[in-house]
Amino acid sequence: MRQPYYRIIFLITLFLPFTGQAQQYLSEVIPERLYQQGIDLLDKKKYSAARESFEEYLERAPQGQYATESQYYAAFSAVRLYNPDGEARLAEFVRDHSSHPKAIRANYELGNFYFNDQQYDKVIEYFEKTDVRNLSVTEEETRNFKLGYAYFTKQNFEEAAPLFDRLKNSENPYRSAAHYYAGYLAMQNGNYEAALTDLRKIEQDESYGKAVPFLIANILNQQGRYDQLKTYGEKILAQNENAGRDAVANFPEIMLLVGEANYRQNNYADAEPFLYSYSQNRNPERGILYRLGYAQYQLGKTEDAIESFKQVASSKDSIGQFASFYLGVLYTKQDNPEYAVSAFETAAQQNFDENIREQALFNLGKTLYDREEYGRAIQSFNQLKEEFPRTRYATEANNLLSESYLNTQNYAEAIKFIESLPNKTMPVRKAYQQVSYQAGTQAFNQSQYRQSVELFDKSLSYPIDRTLVAAANFWKGEAYSIGKFWDKAIEAYNAVFRGLEGERLEGEKALYHTKAQYGIGYAYFNTEQYSRALPYFRDYIQQSALRSNRNSRDKYFVDDALIRLADSYYVTKSYNQAVNTYDRAIRENNPDIGYAYYQKGVIQGIQGNRDEGINSLDQVITRYTDSRYYDDALFQKAQLQLQDGDYGAAIQNFTQLIQSQSQSNLVPYALLRRALAYSNQQKYNQAGNDYQRILDDYITHPTANSAILGLQEVSTQSGGSANFSRYLTKYKEANPEDANVASIEYESAKNLYFSQQYDQAINQLQSFVDTYPENVNTPEAQYYIGESYYRSNRMNEALEIYYSLDAQANHPQAQRIVQRIAELEQLQRNYPNAVTYFQRLARLARNKKEQYNAWQGLMTSYYELSRENPALLDSVDYYAQQIVEKANVSANATSQANLYRGRAAYEQGDLEKAQQFLSETVAASTDVNGAEAQYLLSQILYDQGDYEKSIDALYELNKNFGAYEYWLGRSFMLIADNYVAMDEIFQAKATLNSIIENSPQPEVVQEAKDRLSKIESQETEQRQQKEAADSTQQEAENEVIIEEEPSKP
């Protein structure tokens, strides 16, 4: 048992000295293993672990065999890890161990590191610090290339070029890259031959051959060697089309260069396919799109050219100006003048090329003329003459300008232009006759009658067209008739007859001859020359019956002439003919049938046919209770009964009139006649009451004198003398003996009013009223005070006066007072009050003119009220219909009524009915009513999505109603809306720009600017999105990737 024990002891003892030696060996071996471990980790790019190994080595063996190398590798790893202390530690190593091989290579290694990290400023810094004498040939080549590339990326081409040149002239891994960059830099410096030499050497290079073709093609383009460029480019494109477009960089750009080369040689057929293909692969610049469009234009590819030009025509530069001009030419070729106008106008608004501007202005004017937009054509031609006084288009422009003036509704400018011509040829004189006549009719329709006469006289100064001579004289007669200058009216109508002597009366000549008969008949009738009026009314009716193209308006005048003819027979005491004529009116259901029955009854009474007369009058009383002659019929019937001694029946009918028609001006006469009937029945008290009522309520009325006499008589009969004395005193106070003095004062004050000296008239009339408060003329004086305020535009004061007069019972100017209140309340937008008074006016109306004034006021007031209460649109339609059917006193009245019917139907959603009335307005009107109606028709078409028809309708507005600036401005805004809806953005923008440039209405201009800004913002957003997508694609194609093995430490 003891032997094994000793053996163990021996073994332990034997190894004791050797264990001490092993400990010393391990202390040296373990750091060496840490160092080797760091090197292995470094090779595997595990820089963090490597740094830990090297730093641990330094910690264990700060003076060890590999201490210096470990310091270097720890610093190098820190740099690779982007540790904040990396660069500083490496710099410290270089300083402390400047002669160490690792110190000599530190800058080189840092340059390599930062190159791989694309930090080119640091690449330049460290490679420039590197001592190339300590580098191998391969390392020097690497350093030179990377330094050159760093300078290249920082666009320091002067420093980069020598480095690439040095590399390209020797065999090295960077030779191809050096040729590429050297060639590129030579190209940038304009040294094209040197660039070509470099680039051609690497055409087949695997890395750079893909990028070279575009650079070579670009150099040939810069040299202007277009034939070589086409040959080279087409070969490259063909090769790579088969191999796939990704086989060569910038494939679309090479297509572009080939296309541009053909374009510059005017070889548009070969240029167009390449330019088109490029535009399909890129978001091309405006110049490229313009050249594509121009090539397509030259090749006759109209639709394609339009699409290309449209994409650049809106830009405000020379490209946009040229593109707009050619768009105009192309649209003209397509027979699309409305689009051509927008295009030419856009080109004419820009000043980049004066020749194009001149051509655009002329073509714009010519296209507008062809479209019959004469007002705008005039503006364009005048601008052309002003800006290009020696224009090559002068002759044709002047001819078209003259023709435009003949057809425009801007008659004042037309007359001014023609009057400015020193020599007026026969065509010009004829044009002057026509345009001044048209100006006269326009002034007439706008109620500017004095001005219309002056213009008709200008037309008559060149009496070339006999029809126009007749027309001008006729409308002169109408203007004078409205102003009640009857003698001048008669002279003008007679001039119609003289001017047509010997002429064959047909067409318009016959029309004006016939209408003049009606006019002169009325002039004689209104001057009480009834025997002279008779033959004209008779001939008018006969000739009108022969016309085949009569309309409802003609019937209105024939019906009226028939009544006036009967009246003329009546006044000239041709009673049988008068009755026969009234009977004809009754048979034909004349609109004035109630009046015809009334007049027939009066005549029958005169002829002693009392029963027949009463029967005729009863027709009015029982069948036509709404006739304005209802009170007259009652009065006349009672009068016949009074004359026949049927006092009871007479009293009954006078009483009916007094009670049911209390506002009638016949009431004082009815009271007077009833008093007489009572007296004949010896009912003196009742008779006295009627006389007293006249003296109480109508003290200044003409019947007051008879009433005071009648009261005296019945007072004597009844013994009521005291009562009579009181009324006699009252009568004398109202009618003083010095009435002549008062009359002189009143006439003096009234003359101030009629001479339009309204402030003085107000003072003197008020003085008269204050001095003679009970004078017979005082109520009228008060009325003229109100009129003076009204005509001085002092509306509030006028309204106050009119309201005070309206409160007076039985004012002699009651109808005019009510009309003024209604008009002023409407003017001040107090529409409910206006309606109330227009309704009263309708009840008081004694003729068609007064009836029209009432209904027109009701129509327009209800329309304004309908904005808050749409149900009132039915009232608008009702009164408009009344005007058309019963009070169409003028063409303007009818057209306005139809316009309001159209408005009402439109706002009620009945578009078919609206279109009917609006179309009738347009057909019958050349005034502002027609302009608005045409606009609303266009709006309806827009609402229905029929944009092209809407645009056509709006251009009709511009052509026929161009003188009305408000509706002209609105029409162009709606044209722009139509274009936007049709996605014709260029046309929309051109239209809005035209409004901004030409409209005189600030609110319309601002609206156009706002809409244009919105469109342009949308376009910018769309363009930026497309450019961003294309930029990403092109950057990917242009990127040159340099593959380098990471530098090994």
Image (cartoon, rainbow, N blue to C red):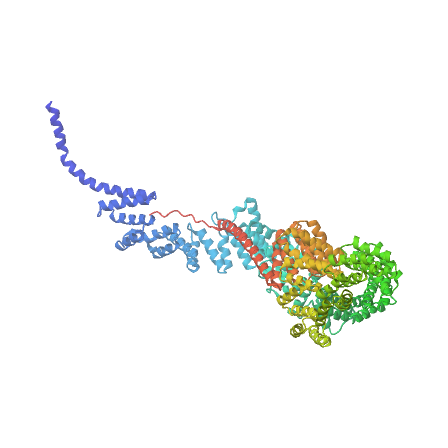
Between 504 and 338, the one lying in front of the other is 504
Asked if residue 568 is positioned above or below residue 90 in the image, the reply reads: below
Q: Quadrant of the N terminus?
A: top left
Asked if residue 744 is positioned above or below residue 516 in the image, the reply reads: below
Q: Is residue 696 visible?
A: yes
Between 882 and 672, the one lying in front of the other is 672
Residue 346 placement, left or right of 696: left
Q: Is residue 699 visible?
A: no
Between 305 and 993, the one lying in front of the other is 993
Q: Position of residue 504 (x, y in %)?
A: 87, 64
The residue furthest front is 719
Residue 537 placement, left or right of 164: right
Q: Residue 699: which quarter of the image?
A: bottom right
Q: Residue 432: which quarter of the image?
A: bottom right
Q: Residue 570: which quarter of the image?
A: bottom right
The residue furthest left is 2
Q: Position of residue 82 (x, y in %)?
A: 34, 49
Counting labels gives 0
Residue 519 placement, left or right of 162: right
Q: Position of residue 540 (x, y in %)?
A: 85, 62
Q: Position of residue 998 (x, y in %)?
A: 62, 63
